[in-house]
Amino acid sequence: MRVSIVILSLLIWASPALAKTPVSIDWLKTMAFASHQTDYTGVFVYQYANHVETSRITHIAEADSEYEKLESLDGSRREIIRHHGQVWCFVNHKIVPAGTRPGRNAFPALLPEQLSILGENYELRDAGTDRVAGHNAQAILFQPKDNLRYAHKIWVHVDSGLLLKAAVLDEKARVVEQYAFTQLQIGREVDRAALKSQLVGLQPSGPANQSVNINSGWVIDAMPAGFRKVTEIQRSMRRQHAPVIQIVFTDGLSAVSLFIEPNDKDEDDIEGLSTRGAINLYQKLVGDKLITAVGEVPPRALIQVLDSARYNGK
Amino acid sequence: MKQGISVLMDGELHEDEAEVLLGEIRRDGDAHGDWAVYHLIGDVLRQPEHIHRDLGAGVQARMKDEPTVLAPRSRAVTQKVRTVALSAAASVVAVGVVAWMSLQIAPEAAPQLAMQDASMRPVKMAIHPKSNDYLMAHQEFSPAADMTGGTAYIRTVAYSLNEKP
């Protein structure tokens, strides 16, 4: 009898049905606002599996645009620069255009509909207060309502609303990836001149990255609940000759992209399932098309999406 | 034949009949196997405390034969072995608990069994740098950057962009 009590109490303890304090979505609005409208520079550590690296991010906001630079501090020099919806990559000793964030305002904010989608798919919980990089932070947990998405835990700077730390957790609450600021400077001291000088001479991505909205005729029969199609385009991609169809679905916090293109690869070059932190990639042939699914969702969700993709067009 | 072996083991055969049957068992491999199994069953029924069957090893061996949905690459072999071992151990414990609990409260037992699948985590390989373009293109539309700003791009730029395509 004593054993049964112990086991039962263990089961009750382990059940996720314990009462948790809900958290106000105002935190999310504050955070989205702060991450785009604040000047800041800081060093953060990014970790997944046995991989750890340090990067510096600098962000400045101006009346009509944002400048942002993400640079690696470990290993070879890698940078990503974002300005006014354009993205550049500094890699292999040269700066190359690396796409855009089309259809966005200069200051994207979380839209009410985006917040409501988020609330349908995740339970938001107050995870208490904590200290990160010497700052006071409010922790918030996004607990998914099924196992086709990861849980996210974020630590928001109480004073500024900036994100100080974020962790992606699997269904057993193991960390899939996380990043955390080790040092963060907010406000005027950020060196605007240095950042902007780097932008001189950078050309917009131009026609090479143009995309058009289309109706591709591809449908996903088993899309996980809560994911909605937000984009369906035909675009060019750097290494592909033929245009690629990209269809994007999002549940408010995570997204899944499907890339559909004519297959010009050997069987051996097809990737199958691979991973980098919370990002998973699943690639396979469907008929004569090569389909690649990419998303910050668990592998089982990507497999479900790709395996239920079919062409329903003419 | 099986009937005969059973009767013989119960000591209900005459001596001459037993002689003939024992001779057949000696020549017939299948019958010999039945003979051994029947004795084992008898032993287990009579003296269960003296029988040691390594159930854990059996479960582990069977799990190694289970097809893994996602083909692992060589890098993670040790991890896989450990995962299998842990899963096997967890399964044995869970089966024990569930079997015991199902006697007490049957409805709660089922989810425990169902949860075992998740402990068998597939081993995955790292995304190849040549696929970074897909990641970058995906990042353009991911809501992560709306909420957290540019740090979301670290997933795209991490580690492998420096490798030559």
Image: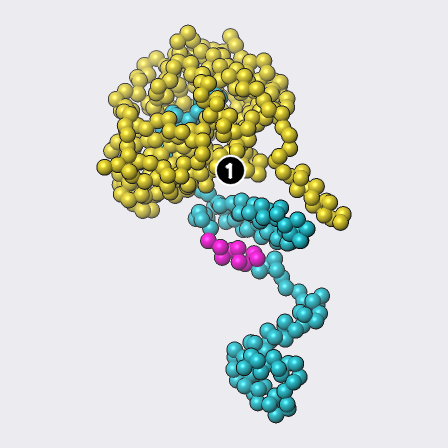
Image-based side of A219 in relation to B14, left or right: left
> Vertical placement of A8 versus A89: above or below?
below
> What is the letter of the cyan chain?
B
Give the position of the N terminus of chain B as an image quadrant: bottom right
Residue type, mark 1 in image:
Asn
Vertically, is A94 above or below B44?
A: above
- Residue lying farthest bottom? B16
Q: Quadrant of residue B96?
A: bottom right
Magenta span includes B64: yes
Number of numbered discs visible in the structure rendering:
1
* The one of A165 and A19 positioned closer to us in this rendering: A19
Residue at image position (58%, 48%) is B110
| Image point (28%, 32%), residue name | A216
Element on which disc 1 rests: loop
Task: Kindly identify which residue carries mark 1.
Answer: A147
Q: Horizontally, is A27 left or right of A232 in the view?
A: right
Q: Where is residue A174, by image quadrant?
A: top right
In the image, farthest residue toward the left: A314
For the residue pair A169 and B79, the one nearer the viewer reads as A169
Magenta residue span: B59-67
Where residue B66 appears, as percent x and y from the top left, is 49, 55
State the hue of chain A.
Answer: yellow
Identify the image quadrant of the C terminus of chain B. Answer: top left
In this rendering, the answer to whether B37 lies above or below A138 is below
Q: Pointer 1 indicates a residue of which chain?
A: A
